[in-house]
Amino acid sequence: MKEAFNVFDQDGDGFITVEELKSVMSSLGLKQGKTLEGCKKMIMQVDVDGDGRVNYKEFLQMMKGDGFSRSS
């Protein structure tokens, strides 16, 4: 699971930002990643601590549940 997190955490700082999410989603050709606003909404769905980023714990919780799919 950490490897999957690291794909999104492009700068290795331990957090997935809106920009990192957009970059990965776009590179995968996923329509949800086309706009920053859409990516912000996805992050808000799983951002428990409200810092605007997804940490590893939040990522794990998202992967156990339905996470980003709730924002579509």
Image (cartoon, helix red, strand yellow):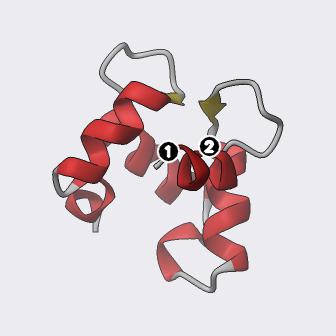
| Position of residue 59 measured from the top left corner of the image (x, y, whole percent) | 40, 39
Question: How far across and down, in percent of the image, does residue 13 sit?
Answer: 75, 24
**Horizontal and vertical percent position of residue 10:** 78, 46
Secondary-structure class at tag 2: helix
Above or below, 12 against 19 in this view is: above
Q: Quadrant of the C terminus?
A: bottom left
User: Crowding near pointer 2: few (<14 within 10 Å), some, many (20+)?
Assistant: many
Q: Position of residue 35 (x, y in %)?
A: 61, 64
Residue position marked by numbered label 1 in the rendering: 40
Residue closer to the observer: 50 or 54: 54
**Residue at the limit of the structure toward the bottom, as seen here:** 29
Q: Is residue 67 above or below residue 15?
A: below
Is there a contact, CB below 8 Å, between mark 1 and mark 2? yes
Label 1: element kind:
helix
Q: Which residue is mark 2?
A: 18
| Residue situated in front as seen by the camera: 36 or 2 | 2
